[in-house]
Amino acid sequence: MSGEGQLRRALSALRHDPLAVTGTAVLTLLVVVGVAGPWLAPAGVNEVNVDRMLEQPSWSHPFGTDELGRDVLSRVMVAARVSLQVGAVSVGIALLVGVGLGLFAGYYRGWLDNVLMRCMDVLFAFPVLLLAVAIVAVLGPGLLTAMIAIGVVYTPIFARVTRAGVLSVREQVFVRAAVSIGASDLRIMRRHVLPNIAAPLIVQTSLSLAFAILSEAALSFLGLGVQPPAPAWGRMLYDGRGFVTEAWWLGVFPGAAIFLTVLAFNLVGDALRDVLDPRQLTVSEARRSAG
Amino acid sequence: MARFVIRRLLQSGAVLLGVTLVVFLLLQLVPGDPVRVALGTRFDPQTYEALRARAGLDRPLVVQYFSYLGRALTGDLGVSFRSGRPVTSIVLERLPATLSLAVTAVVFAMLVAFPLGILSAMRSGSLLDHAARVFSQFGVSVPDFWMGIMGILLFAGVLGWLPPSGYVALTEDPLRWASHVVLPAATVGLVTASILTRFIRSSMLEVLSEDYVRTAEAKGLRTRVVVLRHVLRNALIPVVTVVAVQLASLLGGVIVIEVLFAWPGIGRLTYDAVQARDYPVLQGAILLVAALFLLVNLLVDMLYARLDPRITAR
Amino acid sequence: MSSTRFRLAGAALALMLGALTACTAGESVDVDGADSSGSGGILNAAIGGEPDQLDPHKTSAYYSFQVLENVYDTLVEPDANLDMQPSLATEWTTSDDQLVWTFTIREGVTFSDGSPLTSEDVVYSYNRIISEKLNAAYKFTTVKSVTAPDPTTVVITLTAPTPNLLANLGGFKGVAIVQKTNVESGAVTTKPVGSGPFAVGSYTSGDTIKLVRNDNYWSDKPKLDGVTFTFVKDPTVALQNLRGGEVHWTDNLPPQQVPALRDADGLTVRSVPSSDYWYLALNQARKPYDDVKVRRAVAFALDREAITKAAKFGLATVNQTAIPRNSAFYYDYAPFQRDPGQARQLLDQAGVSGLTMDLMVTSEYPETVTAAQVIAAQLKEVGITVKIRTLDFGQWLDEQGKGNFDSFMLGWLGNIDPDEFYYAQHHSGGTFNFHKYRNPTVDRLLDQARTETDQAARKRQYDQVAKQIVDDASYIYLYNPDVVQGWSPQVSGYEVRTDRAIRFRDVALAK
């Protein structure tokens, strides 16, 4: 089955799965808010007004105001961008590095494979969040370091998935044929191997986006992610934690935003997996350590 | 079998060696002088020199690594930049709290996941099955710290049934320990339960669809007997692995929950060490967690090999 | 989360935690029915964080001093008004030239392990601080020698008259008298031995420190059997624990709930103004902050009430000078009222427009992060764009030391004597003058007032200093926070102190 054929099947499957449709709709909405958030938001994210602090949800502030009198709805909206950005960049890093390593390891086998995969084993021996926290501790907290840390942490998953795919594709007739006509290794990898392992990678990407966003929220909740005054969902929970007993809206809305985003990615990822990757990659392992 | 054991042992050893290298390099990657940064306001030349010498930072990198490794092998993980106490004892002190939370959470998760997973597989497509799938999707997607906050708000705040946080050692007062462990264990356990439910369900479904089950059913054995005698036993073998892996990662992975509930375990130790830039403690905690993780995985593989002899042939 | 961790002295903050109140303070306490001679129960105190270590000379965390306050003694100690009273020293005399101080050490004092405390221990403690350059070493800059001619006499020889020597020797437990064997064995970091009312019983890292009554205590025996300090980072949780009865006392209350708590039944919540102050400093080694007009523009752009409300929920007093209202050295001067027009005008005069200002704050003190966001919003209105830089404290200090900042916000905690409020911060040669303020008049006045023994003249000199510093906007002072603590109705005999010393010696717990 070719890569394009798989993609077509995936898309049509998504159309017919109500959960996947819901997930896709939520994601679309998120992307719109993420891109246009600052223009859509009813108020500026850093419009401080200490005379209106901790006001409960009302028509003028549908999600209430925070401890500095800022509009929570606006901050939740603008924070969507941060979450999506962290998800995209960190998974992008993991995807690039992981797929690269996995390709080489799986294609060339031998000692290179051994060394690379043992390195991945080493990274796998750390719980995800613990490793991310350690990396941030070394590099210092912030948006960039959080993205790097999460990217590093999710690299081994992509390397393993890629390698497993390469190993099964490698021995197939069309790859051997390409080798026999003298095609270069890089060309074979690009033209023949990659398209045929696209399916599990797409699934893994979708699911990893969910975990990456969750990890970023956890890092920010520990005060190690996005730094104020930039809004981020995890950070909003961190800042609002002291106030939730008298201002429930500070705890409910940012948390719900994280939940819905992660849920949407998971729904889409699961639906994709049902069609594309019946072998079932171990999503659970990754999720567990995300918390 | 023996060859398999030896191979796995060697593999784990190699990975552990890699882990020590990563942990060692963490300190080297700190921009600037880690001791100076860690001391901060408490800077005084004597302490500074003593800590630097103790951490061996004045020697070449390779020498530093091998001496770190050598000392680690004898159980010496250096001294805390913050308190000057040996890292090994600091880290080991935190183990009971983490252990008791992790075990409780896994037990809780199993109590929820086994009935739910088995029943939903047996009545695939039923209302219960759908409920189970919603539950597991919820559990996998919800941020555990958010659940924790909501749990504290509800059970400690509004209802006042449980203490909002804190820790009492099991050995000190089992009842008070129990009242403190409920909320964090349930929060962590919820996520674990949803992963387990998923896994048990699909594992059951897989076995249920195999030929011998169909044969047994065709022979007229009642479904329940079939389930108990054949399916469960075969379906549980892979579940054992998942449970153990979950337990292993809980041993070091619940930083956020331990911070939220002021649970003095490894996770909180790590967090505090990060805050205080106490790198030796951070290194020690991470090393211990990774070693535990490898050990549990090794044991699981051995167990698995015993339960299912096909594995060793792989 | 909003708990503030106080880091002490050595490099950036002088935290001078007071000692026990005067020996007589506890005698009037009468507890309804509680047996004062024993079986007084264990008091559970929730503090906002964990001590880094328990060596009083080396620790820098306020959390350590909360515990050590009850474990150690100093030669003299501040009473409720922060006047120095006898403690381990019963009396002292000063030579005519003010250069030799002779202290008489209390007889019959022992450490909690029963070994005697003599003048030798005082000499050992002070020399340790001085020779090892420990945190409190700067309090001994004028000390030439410390000697013990006999077991009950300590002689301190100075290089210059030091009117605030008593404050230096008793201001906080960072100058406590330690036991040599305890220090040399290294046990002092986890199991310190002092002569105070309680002794450290056990320490569970990450969780609790348990103190037990010191039956060898030289003054009235404490009524409590012991004190258990639990580390509760989250103020909401601390409050819930207090309400639930698991905790009897805490200083880690959610600030926004304090006004309601003060009126509520069932808990006692008290606050007193502290001698701490929080301020904004602009780097005068950098353009355009070398221009006083720019600094004054910033001062005019700020709305201190709003900053205080956001950072402390009103649990603070706005102040444009450093020394708080309740001090004898308070100087009433407030030239800056929020005036964006004037601020813009000053910026115009300085020829500054479109200024982007880096503001360095630290997550160690969350109130600086909160206040910075309000400051940024206010400065935006006069055309200054603020870039907030949040660092952890180690890095923050590093940057401060290197002068890598346009501006920063921080506080000075627990100062008592005006010299501590001004000299190191604003003298051109001052240790903590990281913002490079330089004014010869201020230098001269500070040098003069430092050794001035006539109190009235000293006050006049410090008033001049205060006015000049405010006019020059060397520091832009913001507020003096309150000390807020709460306890259950079972607790009696406890007083909140302006120097944040947590003292349980005279406390009793009703059953």
Image (spheres, rainbow, N blue to C red):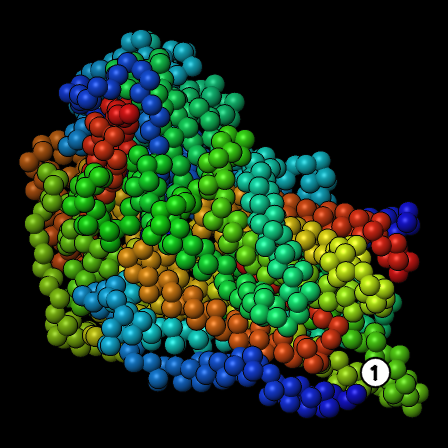
The outermost residue toward the front is B220
C503 relative position to C457: left or right: right
Q: Relative to C429, does residue A74 appear above or below in the rendering? A: below
C332 relative position to C171: left or right: left
Give the quadrant of residue A68.
Answer: bottom left
Q: Secondary structure at mark 1?
A: helix
Q: Find residue B236 and report its horizontal and vertical position in percent.
A: 74, 55
Q: Residue at x 64, y 48 (%)?
A: B289
**What's the residue type where badge 1 is placed?**
Asp
Give the quadrant of residue C243.
Answer: top left
Quick one: C258 or B246, which is closer to the camera?
B246
Q: Residue at x 14, y 49 (%)?
A: C466
The outermost residue toward the right is A180
Q: Find residue B141 and report its horizontal and vertical position in percent.
A: 54, 67
| Residue C18 visible (yes or no) | no
Q: Residue at x 24, y 60 (%)?
A: C310
Quick one: B150 or C145, which is closer to the camera?
B150
Q: Find residue B184 and report its horizontal and vertical position in percent.
A: 49, 49
| Residue C266 visible (yes or no) | yes
Residue position for label 1: A185
Q: Find residue B7 and report its horizontal and vertical position in percent.
A: 86, 52
C396 relative position to A282: left or right: left
**Label 1, residues with CA under 10 Å away: few <14, some 14-19, many ≥20:** some
A201 relative position to C481: left or right: right
